[in-house]
Image (tube, rainbow, N blue to C red):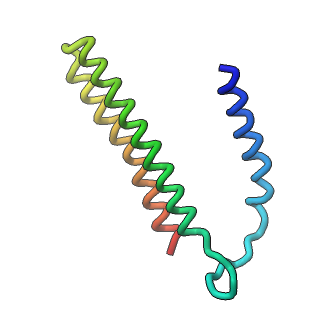
Amino acid sequence: MKTKLIGLATFVIGLLYAAPALAAAAAPATSAGGGTDWGPIGAGVGMAIASGLCGLGQGRAAAGACEGVARNPGARPGIFLFLILGLVFIESLALYTFLIIFLKIK
């Protein structure tokens, strides 16, 4: 528990240190003249992270549903309903990330 708390605190402190750098005015990024446009690369990394985490969430949801049905087969309709609802919400996160990438990267 203590290591998780330390990891979370380190993550939050890192975000706080990054905030002023992200608030600075950005120079126009061009591929001609030596500048590099990192937008598509960042979008790809962001989509990879979102898809990976959504996949992990869906796996855990399916495992929990299977375990619940194995323990109580009579509760299958209720478990199935909430499993599908949860999977829809999890998948919508990946689709929203995909939509934002298409809107942001031209």
- Does residue 66 appear to the left or right of 1 in the view shown? left
Q: Position of residue 64 (x, y in %)?
A: 35, 24
Q: Residue at x 58, y 68 (%)?
A: 39
**Looking at the rendering, which quadrant does residue 25 occupy?**
bottom right
Q: Position of residue 16 (x, y in %)?
A: 77, 46
- The quarter of the picture where residue 14 lies is top right
Name the residue located 53 percent from the left edge and 69 percent from the top edge: 40
Image height of 34 relative to 24, above or below: below
Quadrant of the image for the N terminus? top right
Residue 65 in the image: above or below residue 56: above
Q: Nearer the viewer, residue 102 or 71?
A: 71
Q: Is residue 89 left or right of residue 46?
A: left
Residue at 70 percent of width and 21 percent of height = 2
Q: Residue at x 69, y 78 (%)?
A: 28
Residue 6, percent across and down?
A: 72, 29
Q: Furthest residue to the bottom?
A: 33
Horizontal arrangement in the rendering, residue 1 relative to residue 27 (left or right): left
Q: Total marks drawn?
A: 0
Left or right position of 43 against 8:
left
Residue 4 pos. (x, y %): 65, 27
